[in-house]
Amino acid sequence: MAPRDDLVRRAVWAGDLGEAEIERARKGTVEKVFPKGAYICHRGDRLDYWTGVAQGLVKISTISQGGKAMTFAGIGTGGWFGEGSILKDEPRQYDLVALRETRLALVNRATFFWLYENSAAFNRFLVRQLNERMGQFIATIEHDRILDAKARVARNLSWLFNPVLYPGAGSQIEITQEELGLLAGVSRAVANRSLAELEDEGLIRAEHREIRVLDLAALKTY
């Protein structure tokens, strides 16, 4: 099987597509690798691709005019993003940074709109995706204002196990303390201390470059 064909067939949104739809998607998909720390795009740039993380971790964030940094979401392996900017035909309103070496699947604009206009299954996926992402972004703003550092670490970790946005995550994830700190907007030391306390409370088990979640419900409402 060709790598590009594999990228499409393994995508969560492709499960209910017909063969003709999958073939159209395959022809409009390319792969690109970004090294750790690389900007995939800056706020104000155009990125005319619907984007999936085939392997790696991407941070969606922005910096206000006053210099305050805010992370909207972390996108792990299997996650897709950018449909809003494509549908609205506008530049990206956020920065995209690869937190580790990351392999992306890029569906070009023409192919995205062909699926949008011709595939009922694809549209059902988009509705679920947009609804889930909106809830996540609203929660991010709320949590950034009212939660302490440990709670932000817990909530950001729980979001990486969202079954709609990150299918197939299971009960464990490969992520470093530095990466989780960047997603939660805290230092590596604070992330390390928070994880140790969450482990003492029986919610997670932290291992080398990996975290196993023992009580996802408690993390979601921490």
Image (cartoon, rainbow, N blue to C red):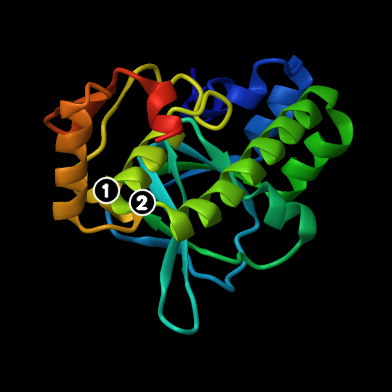
Helix, strand or loop status at disc 2? helix
Figure check: 12 above or below 102:
above
- Based on the displayed image, in which of its 4 quarters is residue 170 positioned? top left
Q: Quadrant of the C terminus?
A: top left
Left or right: 121 in relation to 51: right
The amino acid on which the numbered mark 2 sits, given as a three-letter code, is Leu
Helix, strand or loop status at disc 1? helix
> Residue, x 15% and y 27% (percent of image)?
200
> Residue, x 20% and y 38% (percent of image)?
195
Q: CA distance from mark 1 to mark 2?
A: 6 Å
Q: Which mark is residue 179?
A: 1
| Residue 65 in picture, x, y percent from top left | 49, 83
Question: Mark 1 and 2 residues: CB-CB less than 8 Å, in contact?
Answer: yes
Residue 35 in view, yes or no: no
The amino acid on which the numbered mark 1 sits, given as a three-letter code, is Glu
> Residue, x 48% and y 30% (percent of image)?
78
Residue ID for mark 2: 183
> Residue, x 37% and y 43% (percent of image)?
57
Figure check: 118 above or below 102:
above
